[in-house]
Amino acid sequence: MRIAAAAALLALTGCGAQARAGHGSAGSATPTPAVSPVATAGARAQLAGLRAVERHPGGPVYDRDAFGEAWADTDHNGCNQRDDVLLRDAVAGTATTRQQGRCDHDVVAGTWIDPYTGRTLTFTDLKDLHQAQAIQIDHVVPLAEAWLSGASAWPAERRKGFATDLGELLAVDGPTNASKSDDDPAAWRPRQAFQCEYAARWIATKARWDLGVDASERRALEEMLGVC
C-alpha cells in the first residue's frame, strides 16, 4: 500500500473503526451454510471449558498499541494481513490483485459477501480511501474485549500474534463493523443466519488463545448456538 494512504487506512479498518458508507453495492441477503451438528457439539464443549471471568471497570486500561503494528505480516508471505484476508474472503474469481513490493496479492478490487449482513459489496478501486473504508477487516473477538478477557496480562509478542491471527479475521462491511465496535455477543449480534458460525468462531478463538468469558457473554453464545 502507498505509505500515506496506508497510514490512514490502517487507522480506519480495524475492529471498532469509524467508517462512512463506501461504494459497495448492497444486494440481497445471501444464505450462510449451516454449521454441522458435529461442529456445533464441539463448539458447545469448547464453550463449557472456557474459564469464567468477571469484568471489573477498574481493571487495566485498554491499550491498542500493546497489540503491535496493525496488520503486520506475521506469516512472512510479503503481504500484510489485510490483503491476505481480502484475497481469502473475496467471492471466487472476483479479486483483482497486483504486485506491490514483496506482496504478490495487493488487492485493489473485487466482490465480497458481508457475513454480518449478507449484503454483496463490490469495489472497483481499494486505493481510494472512501472505498477502502467501506470494507474493513474485523477481529471477531475485538482487541479491547480480548484485553479484558486476559490479554492485558500477555507479553507483547503474544498480543501481536492474536491481533494478526487469520483465524479470527473477517472482511466485513465497514459501517457494520463500526456498529459492532468492541462489543461482545451480549451486546451485538450479526444477522440470525450467521449467528451460529459467529458464535463458533468466537468460542474457537477464545479457546485457542485461553481467553475467559463472563456470564452474560456465555449466555449469549449459548443462545446463538441454539440457532444452529
Image (spheres, rainbow, N blue to C red):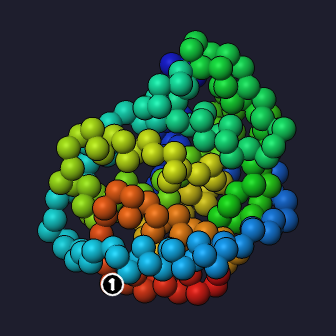
Q: Which percent across, then down, holds residue 197?
A: 61, 69
The quarter of the picture where residue 160 lies is top left
The quarter of the picture where residue 183 lies is bottom left
Quadrant where the C terminus lies? Answer: bottom right
At horizontal 28% and vertical 44% (from top left) the residue drawn is 158
Q: Is residue 70 above or below residue 139?
A: above
Residue type beneath disc 1: Ala
Q: Which percent across, then down, holds residue 94?
A: 83, 38
Neighbour tally class for label 1: few under 14, some 14-19, many 20 plus, Cα within 10 Å: few
Q: Is residue 187 visible?
A: no
Is 141 on the left-hand or right-hand side of 87?
Answer: left
Q: Is residue 91 visible?
A: yes
Q: Which percent across, then down, holds residue 167?
A: 51, 51
Q: Is residue 227 above or below residue 183?
A: below
- Please name the residue that numbered disc 1 is placed on: 215
At horizontal 22% and vertical 77% (from top left) the residue drawn is 54
Which structural element holds mark 1?
helix
Which residue extends farthest top?
101
Is 153 on the left-hand or right-hand side of 179?
Answer: left
Q: Which percent across, then down, holds residue 118?
A: 75, 64
At horizontal 75% and vertical 55% (from top left) the residue drawn is 113
Is 214 on the left-hand or right-hand side of 108?
Answer: left
The residue nearer to you, when weighing 147 against 178, is: 147
Number of numbered tags placed on the structure image: 1
Quadrant where the N terminus lies? Answer: top right
At horizontal 43% and vertical 32% (from top left) the residue drawn is 74
Q: Is residue 222 above or below residue 11?
A: below
The residue nearer to you, when weighing 152 against 2, is: 152
